[in-house]
Structures are given as C-alpha cells and as structure tokens.
Image: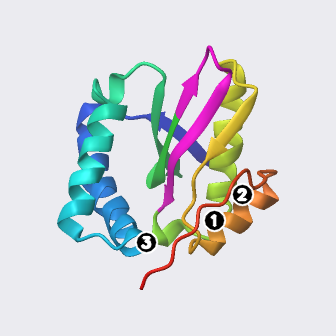
Amino acid sequence: MISFEKMNNKEFQSYIGFMIPDYAKDTAEHYLMSMEEANEKAEKQIESLLPDQENTEGQYLYHIKSEKRLAGYLWFHVMKEEKKAFLYHIYILNAFRKQGIAREALRFFEEEARKLGAASLGLHVFGSNENAIELYRKSGFKQASVSMNKIL
C-alpha cells in the first residue's frame, strides 16, 4: 500500500539535507559547474522557493510510504491564480524502484493539483534521466520545450 504523508519540520530538514546535494550533483554534471557552485545555487533556489520551509504557501512536500516504510519524496507547487502545478521533485529510493511507486506518485500529484484548481501540470527533467522521461511520457506528459548544451 502506497501512502503520502506531509512532511513535518524534522522530516523537511532531513529531506533538504538529501535533496540539495543530489540536485547539486546533477546540476554540476550537466552544466559544467563545480560542486561548490552547484551546491550554492541549489541552496539559494531552496531559500527562494521555500522561504517558510515546509509551511510555504502553495508548496506541497510529501514522504512517499510503502507499507509504512519511507520509499521516496514528492514536492510540487500549485499556482492557484494561474491554474498551474509544477513538479519540483520526485525521488524513489533504490530499494523501491521498479514497483510502480513513481507512477502512483504522479497520479497523486495530478489528483491533488486538480483538487487545488490546477488545469495543467509541468515539470523539468534532466535529459540524461531516460527512465523518468519514459515514465512521464507514459503518464501523458508531452515535451513543451528543449534546452540543450554541449560540454567542450
């Protein structure tokens, strides 16, 4: 059984401690930055997106649970006036991958966003994350734009 539980502050702090270095690693790899630069960029983004941490209005942060065990994380934002929702982060822990949990998390995201008034969903995915791209396509997401770079 998959469930979604809103994070409390202690859980949020733990999540941020995991998410920032994970995101910074991908950012450094894809945009030719040092880890120090990527970490600094990630920290600034988190501060601007989540000024009130897990209590920031319009931001929804969840633990994804499988049989009451932590299986992953889900973070999205709903912009009620624009009727849009944006998926900032979905992450499934290695031990829980390939079990349909990410697909269930996307369904949850869509249902919650719809309940909160969203008429469209958006997300960003690194081009090297082929598994996620395939999942998003199967879930009905379509490519809206392409950003490309070339490391010399």
Amino acid identity at mark 2: Tyr
Amino acid identity at mark 3: His
Along the horizontal axis of the image, is 100 left or right of 64? right
Is residue 146 within the magenta segment?
Answer: no
Image quadrant of residue 100?
Answer: bottom right
Q: Is residue 87 above or below residue 66?
A: above
* Residue at (80% x, 60% y) in the render: 138
Image quadrant of residue 122?
Answer: top right
* Residue at (78% x, 60% y) in the render: 137
Question: Camera-side residue: 96 or 46?
Answer: 46
Instruction: Where is residue 3? Give x, y as percent.
Output: 57, 42
Neighbour class for label 3 at 10 Å: few (<14), some, many (≥20)? Answer: some
Q: Which residue is mark 2?
A: 136
* Tag 3 secondary structure: helix
Amino acid identity at mark 1: Ala
Boundaries of the magenta span: 77-92
* Residue at (21% x, 53% y) in the render: 40
Query: Mark 2 or 3 closer to N-term?
Result: 3
Name, please, the residue furthest toward the front: 152
State if disc 1 and disc 2 touch (CB < 8 Å): yes
Name, please, the residue furthest toward the top: 81
Q: Which residue is mark 1?
A: 132
* Tag 2 secondary structure: helix
Q: Is residue 60 above or below residue 65?
A: above
Q: Which residue is mark 3?
A: 30
Q: Which-is-in-front pick, marks 3 and 1?
A: 3
Q: Quadrant of the C terminus?
A: bottom left
Q: Which-is-in-front pick, marks 2 and 3?
A: 3
Neighbour class for label 2 at 10 Å: few (<14), some, many (≥20)? Answer: some
Q: CA distance from mark 2 to mark 1?
A: 6 Å
